[in-house]
Every structure is written in structure tokens, then in C-alpha cells.
Amino acid sequence: MILARDIKARALFEGFNKVGIVGAQSFTDEGRRLKEWLARGYHGEMGWMARDVEKRISPLEIFPPARSVVVVALNYFTPNQHHPHSSSTGKVSRYAWGDDYHDVVKEKLSSLLAWIREQEPEAAGRVCVDIQPTMDKAWAVRAGLGWLGKHSNVITPEHGSWVFIGELLLNLELDHDDAVMDDHCGTCTLCIEACPTAAITEPYVVNSNKCISYATIELRAPELPREIESQLSGWFYGCDICQDVCPWNRFEEPTTDLRFAPREGNVNAELDEILELTPEAYAERFRGSAMKRAKLAGLQRNARALTTRE
């Protein structure tokens, strides 16, 4: 019978940087906090966050045979830096510089599942990479991969918060990890103080309605809210301010996955180029990129906001 240590070794072979295995139990405290966050309206226009809440809380609602959850983290840090902001360019969040992480993590988890099924023909599983209604950060904390930072991102000692998270729900009974990592944020509040829009309303809680990243990626309004537009600080797609100031992100090591290397124009976007994109050119320009999430209308709205602020 396949063992947990074998699966962990294979996950590292597939290229993941950290892996833990836990039981497929529901989230109690985390589920309560999620419902409180939704009740405050902190999810903004992300209606999908309010749907299928029970699926987010319980993995059995997604994959009823689940007995174990393999939780993985993948380092995506590259040492490139944004160019100084000018009226002609806009900064892109580091997570979107290379290939779409959904595709990369899904491919690795699917390969891991295929290998497990070769060793254990009765094995069945479900790959989850952000799109599925799972609480990725809560799983990473439960599996001991890191702790939840005050900016609400998972922080790992080895890679800071520059990690993507994914899960593999399995119908196998495996040995589980039970060592939860201590919170090492201590008294530090740099992320809270640095947020230009005060989106981190209290430690570990982010109001999406005030968040630059939410506004420039998820918000579908034809114009950015005035209070966001006035504080963009050169950000065109997403925002990394709370991560850039985090002391734990001083020790990062570059990723070994070349698919996260920056594509041309994905570190600093040329605003004129974005404004001139046709639907066909947009589809070609952002094929296989996470930046397509904002859609052409959103990217051009963001570009207009930056050019008019100058």
C-alpha cells in the first residue's frame, strides 16, 4: 500500500517546494470566520465567494470519498524588479509575470495523482487549484506549510509568501501531519501600515472593497473607485505592497520553474500598448497568462486610470 512519505517524496519530485498531508475534516473556526467576512460584505463583487460556502468549509462536499488532503506549496519568486513608475508603464503583481499558475500547479498535481493511481489502482482524487471552492490558505496552515500573515497571505519560513497553493483530495487513508506552524508575525504591523488604502482593516482581515489588487483584477466596474484610483501608486494589475514590506520576504530563493520567468511586458506593462489592444490582440497577448483574469475592459480601464492620474 502506498504510504504518505512516498506521496510526499513524489510531490517534491514533481517540483513542489513544500508538502503536507492532513485529514479531510471540515473547517470549524475557519468556516465561521469566512461567514463573518462574507456577512461584512468584504468580498465586494466576488459573488462566487458567497456561493458554495459549505463546499469551502468541507472537502467532502467537493469530493465525498475524500479521506486525506495532500497540500502543496510552489515557490514562484523571481529576482526581477519593477522599473521606476512613469506615465507610460504600470506595475504588474509578481504572481502574474509568467505562465498562469493555475495551469502549472494543476499540471503538477495531475501528474502526482496519475503516479499515485499507478501505485494504488483503487486510488481516486480531485485536483484543486484556486478555481475550485476550497480554502487554500486554511489548508496550507492546517498542513503545517506556513502560517497566516497579518496581510492574510500564507507565509512560509523558506519562501516567504511568494508561493502558490494547491490540494489533492484523495480517497486514501494516509498518515497525517499534525504539527501546525506557530505564527511568527509577532508584533510586526508593516503590512498594515504600508497599505495605501487601509484595506487590511485588522490583523488577518482584508476588506476587498478597499484593496488595489481586488479593484484592478476582480472589479468589473467601468471605472475604478475614486479612493482606489487616487492611491494606485503605479499599480496596473494587482498589488504587492503588503508582501514587498514583509520581513519574511527578505530570504526568498528564486524559483526553479522556468514557467514563472517574466514574459515580455508582464513586469511593467506599456500602457499605450494596452489601450490599443483589440480583442484579438488581447487574446493572443495574454494567452496562458493569469492577467487575462481582468479581461480586456478591465486592463484598459486600469491603463486609463494610470495615465489620467499623471
Image (cartoon, rainbow, N blue to C red):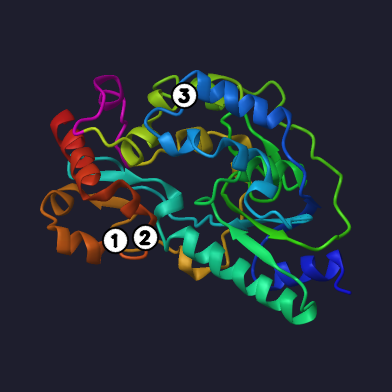
| Left or right placement of residue 191 versus residue 122 in this view | left
Q: How many angstroms separate mark 2 from mark 3 (CA)?
A: 27 Å
Q: Position of residue 192 (x, y in %)?
A: 53, 22
Question: Which residues are drawn in magenta?
Answer: 222-236
Residue 56 in sight: yes
Label 3 close to label 1 by CB (< 8 Å): no
Label 2 close to label 1 by CB (< 8 Å): yes
Q: Would you name the residue on which mark 2 appears?
A: 289
- Quarter where residue 13 is shown: bottom right
Dot placed on the residue nearer the N-terminal end, 2 or 3: 3
User: Who's the residue at 36% across and 60% down the image?
Assistant: 289
Q: Main secondary structure of the magenta part?
A: loop
Q: Would you name the residue on which mark 3 appears?
A: 42
- Quarter where residue 227 is shown: top left
Q: Would you name the residue on which mark 1 appears?
A: 286
Q: In terms of depth relative to the viewer, which is nearer, 7 or 79?
A: 7
